[in-house]
Amino acid sequence: MVSWGRLILHAFSFSPISDNGLSKIYTPDKAKFTVPAAQPAKSVLGGSNGKSFHGPAFISNGMQALENALGQHQQDGNSVLGSLDAPKLPSFRTDGGTPLPFGFPWGQSTANNTNYYTDTPNTGVTRYYDFEISAGQIAPDGVFKEGVLINGQFPGPTIEANWGDMISITVKNSLDEGTSMHWHGLLQKATPWYDGVPTIMQCPIAPGKSFTYTFQADLYGTSWYHSHFSAQYAGGAAGAMIIYGPKNVDYDIDLGPVILTDWYHQDYYTLVEQTMSKASDNTPQPASNNNLINGKMNFPCYAGVNCTENAGVSKFSFTSGKKHRLRLINMSAEAMQKFSIDGHTMTVIANDFVPVEPYEVAVVTLAVGQRTDIIVEADGSPTDSVWMRSNIKYCSLTDGTVDEAVAAIYYESADNTTIPTSNSSVTVAQLSYCNNDDLSVTKPFFPITPDPNPSTTEDLIIEYRTNETDFNLWFVNNVSFRGDYNNPVLLEAKLGNLDFPEEYHVMNFGSNNTVRLIVYNYFAFGGHPMHQHGHNVYVLAEGFGEWDNTVTNPGNPQRRDTVWVQAAKDKDTPAYVVLQFDQDNPGSWPFHCHIAWHVSAGLYVSILERPDDIRKNMKIPG
Ligand SMILES: [Cu+2]
């Protein structure tokens, strides 16, 4: 239900059909709603050969030790993640002439004395990386497939920088199709042309060509980078990006990235074709075959699959009595990940790039694109071994064979080949609750009060419909996005061309100081992780039906860059989230669903912010 009061107000304050892509007073066309094709019946857990395996890691029955049948290189190429050899992370980088005023690269800034949106330090240091994107054979779960690799690795290399460093990355495209790389969550305040999105601010990097992105690490914490070309990242073209900064909580050991990925045995382009098939073909959305932690999991191999049993799960080490930081990143194509560690509670210290007042959870929920940093106190005994788990059974599309990734955690005196026997105390109710932590508990550590009276408010209505040519597409306010690789929005805006084809779905918010977006999801079969480029958004409220104007924690609401909007209750009762951002970053910024299949089918808008500034002041490198 839309808020009629506000829409009528809009009708008086704007021309009802404006040329800025706003205020078209759109109401959902419920008669056109499409019900997605039914998923095939799920396999029994473990698949047709499940009786040949035991335990949550699907170890073949003869095996009584947790050993990796495939070598690290066969599983994940050149990646070192997921092995006990993976390096622990430092508090910050000290190489490359890092200055340490007052003992830290960022000087006297702390987590609670500095607004990181306005006061990024300048370290004067640049971190250089060379990435080559190429196709290559990997077998993360023992099933061999051609992945899209970065420097021959899956997951890709971990970027490490200090807050305030410059990062310069030359991306060489050795694929036979285009590519581009997006640095998820960074604001790109000085360099909006290096955000890495084809059709919005750059042309794709052509096969055989290179492109250098140079930008500042303007926020700190845990994030990732990924190809923003088609659904390439679902084939593997993604990695962790760690920006060291002030700590909001003390801990002893940084275990580094814990990357959670739903996994598909088919190539990503086959899956995109599947999602884009004719509506009358009644093809279901792709279902994942497995789930990975740091690029590893076993698969219960069955006849007809090119597969190695006991391929290997990831292993981590705990030191008893110490506090460990784990940097959880959901790099999935579709899955909402429900993460837990048997017998251990977790303290959340950051969501996305926003440190929060610490709070305890039994399960961490991460929608696609989201990150959560946790502290886990190793309060077991020195010989303990326990399972780490990430479950996708209830809130995601799986084929049922494997619906939970596991990894082994070994305390310092445990045998590193022991099969843990720990059990999870997480309940089905917790695993089937398909939403992030309540907004009332997620309070940013550095408080900011948003403008209670935003300059403009826009409703965004999400629908799933069959179009005139028999394709099932996502619509936002009656437009399904299609971009043009040759005419990126930012470059057009620089030229003063603000008349965009409707399917670019440019929403020109002009020079408004603050923008409020009320996002209504009318799709009753799933939610959407909505990712805002160029900003952290305030998350003011969420719920079902019509927003009652109540804001959660109005003095300091949750902020993040990827916000889950739940599934609608039914076609008359949408789910909503109320978001707001300050227009302090001139540029063209995608706001899109991060589910790979949804963004491919049009769930995408381009927010054009301060086009006058872009035209007059922006110096875009040629
Ligand atoms: Cu979506």
Image: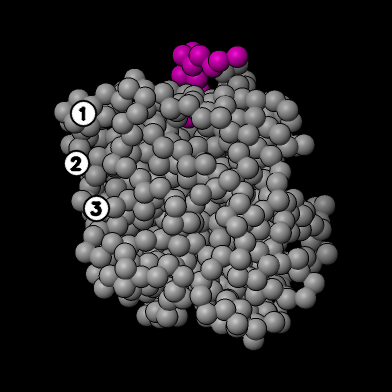
Q: Which residue is mark 2?
A: 112
The number of numbered discs placed on residues in the rendered structure image is 3
x and y percent of residue 241 in the render? 45, 41
Q: Which residues are magenta?
A: 608-622
Residues at marks 3 and 2, CA–CA distance in whole angstroms: 20 Å
Task: Count neighbours of disc 3 (C-alpha within 10 A) and say few if under 14, some if 14 to 19, many if 20 or more.
Answer: some
Q: Do residues under tags 1 and 2 come within 8 Å of each other at their CB atoms?
A: no
Asked whether, in this view, residue 352 is left or right of residue 69, the answer is: left
Give the amino acid at mark 3: Asp
**Image point (52%, 80%), residue name:** 64
x and y percent of residue 360 in the render? 27, 65
Is 609 colored magenta in this rendering?
A: yes
**Residue 46 appears in view:** yes
Q: Which residue is mark 3?
A: 252
Residues at marks 3 and 1, CA–CA distance in whole angstroms: 21 Å
**Residue 434 appears in view:** no
Q: Residue furthest bottom?
A: 51
x and y percent of residue 49 in the render? 69, 82
Q: Where is 502 relative to 319, above or below?
A: above
Q: Which label number is shown at residue 107?
A: 1
**Image point (31%, 73%), residue name:** 383
